[in-house]
Amino acid sequence: MNRTEELQLTLESIDQGIVSFDKAGKVGIHNIRALSLMDLPPDLFDNLNTYDDIVRYQVQRGDLAGDASFVDVYGQYQYFKGGRANSPDLYIRRNASGATIEVRTRHLANGGMVRTFADVTGYFEAQQAVRESEAELRDLLGAFPGYIVATDEHLCYTYANERIATLLGHTPQDIIGREVQEILGKQRADAIQQEILAIKAGQASVGISSYPATATRARLDLEVTHVPGRLKANGAQTVYVFGIDVTARRLAEEALIAARDAAESSSRAKSDFLSHMSHELRTPLNAILGFGQLLELEHQSDQDRLVWGREVVKGGRHLLELINEVLDLARVESGKMAVQLEPMALRPVLEDCLTLMRQQASARSITMSLHLHPQGLAVLADRTRLKQTMLNLLANAVKYNTEAGTVTVVCELTTGTKQGKGDQGVRINITDTGKGLTPTQTARLFQPFERLDANLAHIEGTGIGLALTKRLVELMHGHIGVDSTPGQGSTFWITLPLAG
């Protein structure tokens, strides 16, 4: 085997196609791979054909345009006319079968040239996929309704979207490659540096960055998230920063806080006013009650004046009751009423309350009873406030009951999780046989000065008792509610913590 045959065998064994041309453009050595990649017939590559013959064949077949030009895979115009002098040294085109072929030309010192052909379909498609993915990512980042930057380990910007660049008064091209300190100033750059050091462990960090209003834009509050990127082999790490506009939310929160503060201030002012007024009213009221009682004593024989005196005393006592309740309500709402919770047996407290109410109940022939299940129930409560609560509820049960009705007090353990009844405690039920309440009336209960039209029935009251009772129960960590059916009476209940 001579050297020419060895060279040809070598050429046939490689994966690239190869063709040589002498200085006159005649075809020299070539391999079958070149014919395959360019989809050309073997006889086109005999020693009698030239470079221009191959170009003309491709024009006739339609591979090239009539002027021997074509558009490569990048959309660039390439021109072959005029022989090898106009042949590009490197181009990438698709052959007749659709494969992507990279063509390279090396010019020889003797005026000839060697052209190689390589199938780069897989590489080109991979590169194209990367470019498309990058373009899609750029489109996605551009469409993101927020602010995005990325910085390298030297705190230099490597990416900035249009939104954040505009906010900072630059274009993305102005920012990328520059240090954060140069754009934001040393103080903010130092704060960001500390933030980045804190997230090196891999945890994202979320905070608020505020930008005051300027002549060209309104105030802007951003919820900023710093996210560490993958740690590279050389120790470098990109940090991604995402900002979401939360200005509207922050303004709403500030407005809500301002409204709450204003409401609390108004409530304190109202409570202080009621407290001071109640104290101021007591002094003249006590004088009225005193002189009313003197009228009762001095005019026993004068029936008219006796009735007048009794009416003065009755009205004064009702007004004093109102003042006391208003004062208590104001103290609760202003937070000035303290309770002393202590373990106490229920039966003695409830029996005292029933004893105080029996005369009022007897006047209307109302029967009162007490039942405890089990007998030794004890609660955590303030003794004075518990008695005040029970007297209010018992007074209502008598006042709004029917003649010769009943009031039943039942105490029982509660261990359920139903809202308003406690997870572990004691429930006290006060059941009457009155007219009952409609759902509409029930919804209006426990509001100050709400009497549910009782004034139309000429039933005395202030409309404060239930509102005060509710607040007292809540001060003792309890709950209050009512179950009622029109025509069948009502059950007002409270729950209190069970004494350990």
Image (cartoon, rainbow, N blue to C red):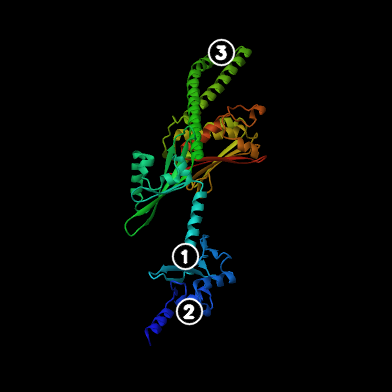
- The alpha-carbon separation of the residues under discs 2 and 1 comes to 20 Å
Under circle 3, the secondary element is helix
Q: Are marks 2 and 1 in contact (CB under 8 Å)?
A: no
Mark 2: which secondary structure? Answer: loop
Mark 3: few, some, or many residues within 10 Å (few <14, many ≥20)? many
Above or below, 377 relative to 215: below
Amino acid marked by disc 2:
Asn
Q: How many marks?
A: 3
| Residue under pointer 3 | 295
Q: Which of marks 1 and 3 is nearer the N terminus?
A: 1
Q: Residue 84, image x and y in percent?
A: 47, 67
Q: How far apart are marks 3 and 2 (CA)?
A: 147 Å
- Relative to 185, does residue 230 appear above or below in the rendering? below
- Which is nearer the eye, 258 or 91? 91
**Residue type, mark 1 in image:** Ala
Residue 166 lies, in percent from the top left, at 47, 41
Instruction: Give the residue at x 59% y 37%.
Output: 367
Residue 47's tag is: 2
Q: Position of residue 479 (x, y in %)?
A: 51, 40
Name the residue that disc number 1 marks: 85
Quick check: can you spot residue 353? no
Residue at 51%, 65% (x, y): give it. Answer: 82
